[in-house]
Image (spheres, rainbow, N blue to C red):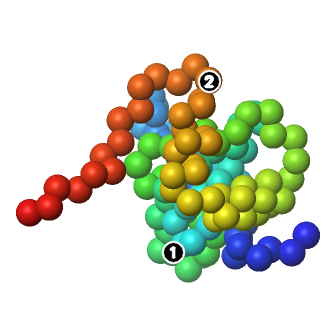
């Protein structure tokens, strides 16, 4: 499959959580230099990442400490194909369609707080 959205395969290191010397590595795909998509037990996740600036590790990124999003469950296809389709589908939606079609109808979600209105000063 071609890669029209400019994805590249990279690895993200995540951690430490409980033990200060334990890190996890996740293989996935990078979009737009800082958005990392990966699969964990069939769940498609998205995190913000930063590049590790070491010449010996050109494909290594670290978690950007922004939290993450779970985008889909029970994914059983190749990640490059899935993320390409997802990005193309989201690019074709406007913001209002995304709010009404995707966010409003999430099953089992709690209240979502957004700050979309900017005060004029």
The circle drawn on residue 107 is: 2
Give the alpha-carbon distance from disc 2 to disc 1, as whole Å.
43 Å
The circle drawn on residue 65 is: none
Q: Earlier in the sequence, mark 2 or mark 1?
A: 1
Q: Quadrant of residue 23?
A: top right
Residue at (60% x, 31% y) in the render:
105
Position of the N terminus by quadrant: bottom right
Q: Count neighbours of disc 1 (C-alpha within 10 A) and say few if under 14, some if 14 to 19, many if 20 or more.
A: few
Query: Under tag 2, what secondary structure?
Result: loop
Image position, residue 94 (x, y; %): 56, 60
Farthest-out residue, bottom: 55
Residue at (62% x, 59% y) in the render:
93
Residue to which mark 1 is pinned: 54
Q: Quadrant of residue 37?
A: bottom right
Image position, residue 9 (x, y; %): 72, 66
Residue 106 drawn above or below residue 94:
above
Please say whether residue 86 is visible from this viewpoint: yes
| Disc 2 to disc 1: CB gap under 8 Å | no
Position of the C terminus by quadrant: bottom left
Residue 80 drawn above or below residue 109:
below
Farthest-out residue, right: 1
Residue at (55% x, 72% y) in the render:
33
Q: Count neighbours of disc 2 (C-alpha within 10 A) and say few if under 14, some if 14 to 19, many if 20 or more.
A: few
Please say whether residue 28 is visible from this viewpoint: no
Farthest-out residue, top: 108
Farthest-out residue, left: 121
Query: Under tag 1, what secondary structure?
Result: loop
Which residue occupies the foreground of this view, 24 or 101?
Answer: 101
């Amino acid at each position: 499959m071609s890669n029209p959205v400019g994805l590249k395969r990279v690895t993200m290191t995540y951690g430490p959580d409980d033990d200060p010397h334990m890190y996890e590595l996740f293989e996935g795909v990078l979009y737009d230099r800082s958005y990392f998509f990966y699969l964990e037990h069939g769940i498609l996740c998205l995190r913000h990442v930063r590049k590790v600036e070491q010449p010996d590790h050109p494909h290594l990124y670290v978690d950007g400490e922004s939290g993450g999003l779970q985008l889909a469950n029970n994914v059983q296809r190749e990640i490059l194909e899935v993320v390409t389709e997802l990005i193309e589908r989201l690019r074709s939606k406007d913001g209002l369609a995304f709010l009404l079609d995707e966010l409003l109808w999430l099953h089992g979600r709690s209240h979502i707080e957004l700050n979309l209105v900017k005060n004029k000063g």
